[in-house]
Image: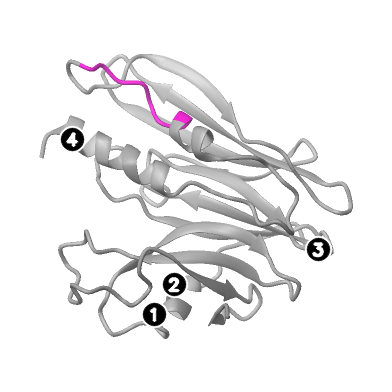
Amino acid sequence: MHFVTLYLQVMYRAVACAIVLSAAAASAGDFRPFWSSTTCDRSSATGLALKQSRTVKSDVVVSAAGQRAWSEVAVVGFAEGGCSNTSRLFIDGRQVYRMEPNGQNGDANAMAPIAWSADGRLLAVEFAAVNYATDFFPSSILVYDSRSGSISEPEWYEGVKKLAPKDCNFMLQRVTGFDRRGRINFVIEDDLDDPGNDHPNGCGFGRGKTLSLDPASGRVEAVR
């Protein structure tokens, strides 16, 4: 598949994974412009990255205790046509997490804080670990604990698999925030475009089903 086609597919999924805050969370605006701005500018003729260096900052998400969280994604395009991203998460101006462009994080990684828990302890962050030369845009969830200063990735995927038929494919559409119980609400949708999907009718999530995640246990439940 031509590189330009792959790039456009990545861009499509980036926009499709737009983040919308829940009403209970501190508002940080519409994240669609942020996601689309974290990819390299490319030549329309060749599809190769243009030489560039810029930093894209997300909106600020403020906790009930006044903690301010945001992310910054440094986008660097090289003269040879390649590109790489480095993403950082900040709390009150202090860097608490960093994603380097490597095999684990991908060279097109990005992240954005979504919402604080009601008590101001936990911060839900949506992130993508993806490479530029792919049409797969997997996003996932990180949780920052302001009490311990630690960051973790809950096993939400395994929890969702327990609610779905065997071997069907799904993907995270967006994280919406915390509920009153301190659980993270997120929206899942069927990934019908995956050629390896053994269930052509999907997992039963359709274009979007809201689930809740207990960040401590990793337990996932349907939101009724």
How many numbered callouts?
Answer: 4
Q: Residue at x 31, y 14 (%)?
A: 79
Q: Nearer the viewer, mark 2 or mark 4?
A: 4
SS state under label 2: helix
> In which quadrant is the N terminus drawn?
top left
Disc 3, disc 2: CB below 8 Å?
no
Image check: 104 left or right of 223? left
SS state under label 4: helix
Q: Amino acid at mark 3?
A: Ala
Give the residue at the far right of this rendering.
65
Q: Amino acid at mark 2?
A: Tyr
Q: Amino acid at mark 4?
A: Thr
Task: Write the start and end of the magenta stretch as one range.
Answer: 37-44
Q: Which quadrant of the structure image shows residue 120?
A: bottom right
Q: Which residue is mark 2?
A: 157
In the rendered structure, does residue 175 fall within the stretch colored magenta?
Answer: no
Q: Position of residue 82 (x, y in %)?
A: 29, 25
Q: Residues within 10 Å of mark 1 (few under 14, many from 20)?
A: some
Q: Which residue is mark 3?
A: 118
CA–CA distance in space, label 4 to label 3: 43 Å
Q: Amino acid at mark 1?
A: Lys
**Residue in the foreground of this view, choosing between 6 and 87:** 6
